[in-house]
Amino acid sequence: MSRAVTDLLSILDLEQLEVNLFRGQSPKSGWQRVFGGQVIGQALVAATRTVDGRPPHSLHCYFMLPGDPKIPIIYEVERIRDGKSFSTRRVLAIQHGQAIFAMSASFHREEEGFEHQADMPKVLGPDELPSEEDVKGRLLLQMPEPMRTYYERERPLEIRPVEIKRYTSRDPGEPRFHVWIKTLGRLPDDPAIHQSVLAYASDMTLLDTSLFPHGRTVFDPSIQPASLDHAMWFHRPFRADEWLLYAQDTPSAGGARGFSRGLIFKQDGTLVASVAQEGLIRERRS
């Protein structure tokens, strides 16, 4: 297992301070603010640890303040309800005495019922796309400086964009973006870990999709990007250490906000999760 994956699992393994109270750390990565996916993943871990025997099926989040990576984040869980089939939790993430993030999550005992799902888009598979080594060897010098810095960091997830030219061109593209994702090492078998890791990963590239039709990226220094809210639904079992296709589209942008949606599929076409997010894509004015 790579050091970055070990560090991710450590970040998601919260310290319990008291009943319903947990503490999470941030990686020493040099970022000026906490990555939004980290807070989503940690909040889901906190909520899950207060529910016995029911997996999460949905979560709805709001980002209120940027997180400070230099100090711990305190997660306070409120046990809203435990019914016969569903449990509901509310989580506040707190720093410097203020709430920086809020999440509501619902858990559902496993039941049999009707089944249908959307079809997976027909795109190139992960083995047909440039690997991380290929990107670093052939494409890195064509990328803007912030994108090069991103790819040069050691990361727990491998990401293979289908539309890789998006990062070497400013030409506007179709309002769709597809990326294959998985961890760079094997994870433990606990399904809760895979759900938390996918929640962490779900904040990656989604906001960027809303800039695709405009030929811009979140790495453009003239763009001020920030996640505003985030919703996720878990549909079926999966492993986050096996390739998953994150198929994203952006129905709307306006008022300095971009809206994006994502469907996450296993390689065999099984739909395992859905995501929606609105984010700030404000253009900096000189």
Image: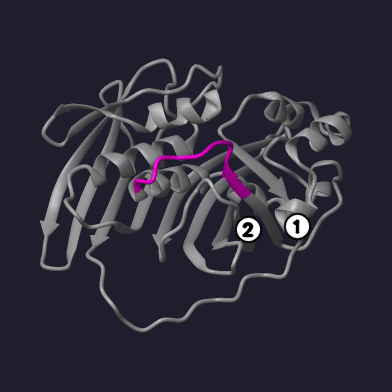
Specify the quadrant of the image occupied by residue 151. top right
Do the numbered discs 1 and 2 sit on residues whose CB atoms are within 8 Å? yes
Going 34% across and 46% down the picture, which residue do you hit?
Answer: 190
User: Could you say which is closer to the camera, residue 219 or residue 87?
Assistant: 87
Residue 183: in magenta span: yes
- Residue 63, percent from left and from top: 41, 41
The residue under label 2 is: 253
The three-letter amino acid code for the residue at tag 1 is Pro
Does residue 71 appear in the picture of this structure?
yes
Mark 2 crowd level (few <14, some 14–19, many ≥20, 10 Å Cα): some
Quarter holding residue 177? bottom right
The boundaries of the magenta stretch are 181-190
Please tell me which residue lies in front, 12 or 43: 12
271, 226: nearer the viewer: 271
Whether residue 124 appears in magenta in the rendering, the answer is no
Give the labeled residue for mark 1: 213
Q: Give, as a three-letter code, the residue at label 2.
A: Ala
Return the x and y of residue 38 as percentages of the image width and height.
Answer: 44, 35
Query: As displayed, is residue 130 above or below residue 15?
Result: below
Q: Establish if 228 lies above or below 31.
A: below
Looking at the picture, tell me which residue is in the foreground, 264 or 38.
264
